[in-house]
């Protein structure tokens, strides 16, 4: 039996329980199989020199956690810089927010090289390695350069933009070539696969070998869509536990005469949070019957606040939220409750269950697991309605949600109005259909289908990095 080795920048961190979909999903996937999880500890170590790190390991159940701290320069150039000020905006179609800086790329390469050097001695011959997300695209190239011959798969949790957006990256050819060091590349949606393939065929002159296989740079890789899911049973269990039940009951009591709407996100410009507030404002303006009766709870957990674009967003949002409450609020009703803090994960299912409308309206999102968690939290007899951006990866699967264009303020207000007044039978039918998709394509399906594809026979041993 091969051992599973997962590598990701962020590991599940009990201090940051609502950190984002990746850490939660991987924690749940690895718990099932056991194995090794390697990545950044989350700490910045002032004593460390750039490119250096000391490995720490500990056991958490069946999973061995192996982590390294980052030197301040590496944290700035690799994490805040290339990963979150270049790749994140570009892959979310936001060239306007990208900050192309030579030193960022140096830091990104340095940390990927350091990760490879620290990981290599921990590897066994029979291991299968699964690398995650945009922080670590060149990791397999670095591992192959050190002689690593094991199967290596890569999963990208964020979207892939069209080729001409990728081509705006000053080093796009270097970056995209690095995908060929993997045996399998998993993406979230068919739209992402189409963009990726088009880039490789047109910009990298790759050869299409059929069946998702592409050849270029003297190597071959396979690409496919593996939409990530949630651990439905685990989330349902969380929903039955005391914290969730109490959260739900407390909200229902407090808002017994009102309808609640909910948004839960990291405070990120890709999530369309200001656009959502504007749509809610439009709802109150265009459909005044909702004044005094609808309340939007918006939880935006702090994220990457050292990156300038995030600080700007926070300011914009505070202005918008203050404006709507000032203009429409009354002594006995405030339209919006904005919370810029982490809400404990164990309360999330209760929160979702208490609200009539779940608003998941990103401008771009790889998948968005909150959309799936919202659906699973509902009471099937009296379910709430999911309003979902057509630009979230989840929209390819969740066709029975109310799909919206988050740039269309009026259209979104109309959809929220429809959701608030949707008859019970339609809510039940949509919920049933959504549950069916979410349960069939859960986290276990995702892990298994990716790993089965990674284990499938490769055409030949491919130990060399892309030429
Ligand atoms: C997204 C990314 C993850 C990341 C998470 C939280 O889900 O795909 O790779 O871990 O955001 O962001 P952070 O920068 O705090 O790790």
Image (cartoon, grey):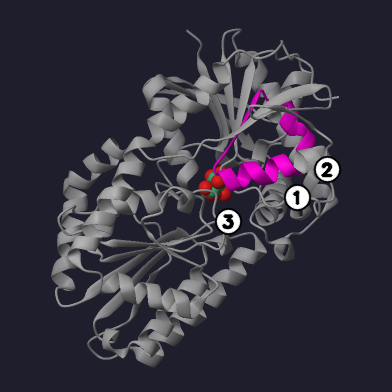
* Residue where numbered disc 2 is placed: 203
Q: Dot 1, how many residues are within 10 Å of its Cα: few (below 14), some (14-19), or many (20+)?
A: some
Foreground: 347 or 45? 347
- Per the model, the C-alpha gap separating discs 3 and 2 is 32 Å
> In the picture shown, does residue 324 fall above or below 16?
below
Q: Is mark 3 within 8 Å of ligand 1?
A: yes
Q: Secondary structure at mark 2?
A: loop
Give the Cα separation between the discs numbered 1 and 2: 8 Å
Q: Position of residue 101 (x, y in %)?
A: 82, 54
At horizontal 51% and vertical 55% (from top left) the residue drawn is: 392
Where are the magenta residues, as a range?
175-198
Q: Nearer the viewer, mark 1 or mark 3?
A: 1
Kindly check if marks 1 and 2 are in contact, taking CB atoms under 8 A apart as contact. yes
Q: Nearer the viewer, residue 330 or 13?
A: 330
Q: Which residue is pictured at 68% across the width and 27% down the height?
A: 210
Residue carrying label 1: 163
Q: Residue at x 14, y 61 (%)?
A: 249
Residue at the image point whose x is 36% and y is 55% from the top: 400
């Amino acid at each position: 039996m091969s051992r599973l080795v997962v590598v990701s920048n962020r590991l599940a961190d009990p201090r940051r329980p609502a950190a984002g979909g990746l850490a939660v999903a991987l924690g749940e996937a690895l718990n099932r199989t056991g194995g090794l999880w390697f990545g950044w500890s989350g700490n910045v170590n002032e004593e460390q020199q750039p490119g250096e790190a000391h490995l720490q390991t500990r056991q958490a159940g069946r999973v061995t956690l192996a982590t390294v701290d980052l030197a301040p320069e590496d944290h700035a150039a690799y994490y805040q810089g290339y990963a979150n000020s270049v790749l994140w905006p570009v892959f979310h179609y936001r060239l306007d927010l990208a900050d192309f800086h030579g030193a960022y790329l140096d830091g990104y390469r340095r940390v990927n090289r350091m990760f490879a050097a620290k990981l290599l001695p921990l590897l066994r011959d029979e291991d299968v390695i699964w690398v995650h997300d945009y922080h670590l695209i060149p990791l397999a190239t670095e591992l192959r350069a050190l002689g690593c011959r094991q199967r290596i798969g890569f999963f990208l949790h964020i979207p892939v933009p069209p080729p001409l957006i990728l081509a705006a990256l000053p080093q796009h050819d270097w970056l995209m070539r690095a995908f060929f060091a993997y045996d399998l590349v998993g993406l979230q949606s068919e739209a992402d696969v189409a963009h990726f393939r088009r880039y490789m065929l047109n910009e990298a002159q790759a050869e299409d070998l059929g069946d998702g296989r592409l050849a270029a740079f003297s190597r071959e890789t396979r690409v496919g869509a593996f939409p990530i899911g949630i651990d439905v049973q685990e989330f349902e269990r969380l929903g039955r536990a005391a914290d969730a039940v109490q959260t739900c009951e407390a909200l229902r009591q407090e808002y017994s005469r009102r309808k609640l709407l909910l948004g839960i996100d990291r405070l990120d410009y890709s999530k369309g949070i200001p656009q959502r507030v504007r749509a809610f404002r439009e709802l109150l303006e265009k459909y005044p019957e909702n004044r005094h009766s609808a309340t939007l709870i918006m939880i935006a957990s702090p994220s990457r606040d050292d990156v300038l674009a995030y600080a700007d967003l926070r300011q914009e949002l505070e202005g918008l939220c203050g404006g709507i409450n000032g203009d429409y609020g009354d002594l006995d009703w405030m339209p919006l409750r904005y919370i810029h803090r982490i809400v404990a994960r164990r309360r999330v299912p209760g929160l979702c269950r208490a609200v009539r409308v779940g608003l998941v309206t990103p401008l771009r999102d790889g998948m968005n697991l909150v959309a799936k968690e919202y659906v699973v939290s509902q009471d099937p007899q009296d379910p709430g309605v999911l309003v979902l951006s057509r630009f979230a990866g989840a929209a390819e699967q969740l066709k029975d949600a109310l799909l919206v264009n988050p740039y269309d303020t009026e259209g979104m207000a109309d959809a929220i109005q429809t959701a608030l007044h949707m008859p019970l039978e339609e809510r039940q039918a949509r919920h049933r259909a959504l549950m069916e998709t979410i349960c069939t394509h859960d986290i276990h399906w995702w892990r298994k289908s990716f790993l089965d594809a990674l284990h499938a026979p490769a055409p030949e041993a491919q130990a060399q990095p892309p030429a």
